[in-house]
Image: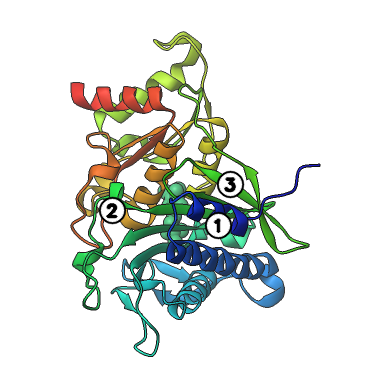
Amino acid sequence: MAQAVSLTRFLIEEQRAGRAPADLRLLLDVVARAAKTIGVKVSKGALAGMLGEAGTENVQGEAQKKLDVIANEILLQANEWGGHLAAMASEELENVHQIPCDHPRGDYLLLFDPLDGSSNIDINVTVGTIFSVLENPRRDHAPAEADFLQPGRKQVAAGYVTYGPSTQLVLTVGNGVHAFTLDRETGEFIHTHPFMTVPEDTREFAINASNARHWEKPVQRYITELQQGKDGPRGVDFNMRWVASMVADVHRVLTRGGIFLYPLDEKIRLQGGRLRLMYEANPMAMLIEQAGGAASTGRERILDLQPQKLHQRVPVILGSRNEVERVVAYHREG
Ligand code: AHG
Ligand code: MN
Ligand code: MN
């Protein structure tokens, strides 16, 4: 039987191939270790008093779950002392998190959504952690928000971890998308899905259809055509899925294809969209493009957006290339 390849071995081989400098390898190993700890807390659930509200709000005015706060703390603490990071930014923190001055400062910036899909925690449905890695552009001083505001195409690594029936880590360092499944007995992430690809075509879509009346015309047109199925202009039936955890919905798209949409709508126009550019849209867009799919706001490629602020929100349309291109064409036609 072929020997199982662990995440550690995979990263060392990426380093040897010149695709992951030693500090990036260390960073990714630390993120994976933190994710294992988060996964343990998530799986304990009610047994360890992990469910429910924290009683606080984050910077975006969203009620925090206990696990949002705990996952955030685990990621911050795990990444502070390794010497590989210059600073961190989190969906749950208002400002840039500096590395404490008793630890050395490294060359990378780490951004994360510590717990994605947190409305699903209390009902025991898949949640996850999403992360993005950038280089620190100015190495001579403590990073400020402006140093994080780099377009997504500059990410040197991106990934997510799903805490579902199994815990899986999905990663790209710019050479395809690779998934690792946690072996709970040995504690190792094992390379189980090399070079994942998103099929160009799909008959499955994911959108929160309760917002239909607020969508812009191009999205209404696209979804109506899918719903008309065999009887409409597409001439085939489409199926719909919506987990309400972006990690789970994107993981399905990466595994068997599909299109995922959280478009702009009238309710959220002023805030720019629902999902966050730096913690959700950019890392997922890098993964989807690395797997051969496409990711757009409907009007622009997500990875080309110039971020204006850390907690910026954007419309997200990603997945199977031909479907995403069709939605973009409908936006162009107006
Ligand atoms: P978070 O839990 O980090 O705030 O993110 C939730 C996001 C995303 O995971 C999901 O796709 C979307 O919100 C669900 O939105 P609806 O509540 O509109 O379904
Ligand atoms: Mn999220
Ligand atoms: Mn979150």
N-terminal of the pair, mark 1 or mark 2, is 1
Q: Nearer the viewer, mark 3 or mark 1?
A: 1
> Residue placed at 35% from the left, 66% from the top?
108
**Residue 301 x %, y %:** 27, 37
Q: Position of residue 289 (x, y in %)?
A: 39, 37
Q: Let me know if residue 334 appears in the view.
A: no
Report the disc number at residue 179. 3
Q: Is residue 14 left or right of residue 106?
A: right
Residue 136 on image: x %, y %: 28, 66
How far apart marks 3 and 1 lie (CA) works out to 16 Å
**Residue drawn at x 45%, y 17% as measured from the top left:** 228
Query: Mark 1 packing: few (<14 Cα in 10 Å), some, or many (20+)?
Result: some
Q: Please report the residue visible at 54 percent of the width from the left and 56 percent of the height from the top.
A: 11
Amino acid of disc 3: Ala
Q: Residue furthest right?
A: 1
Above or below: residue 280 compared with residue 82:
above
Figure check: 26 above or below 198: below
The residue where tag 1 is placed is 12
Picture quarter containing residue 329?
A: top left
Secondary structure under tag 1 reads: helix
> What whole-number distance in Å separates the C-alpha atoms at marks 2 and 3?
27 Å
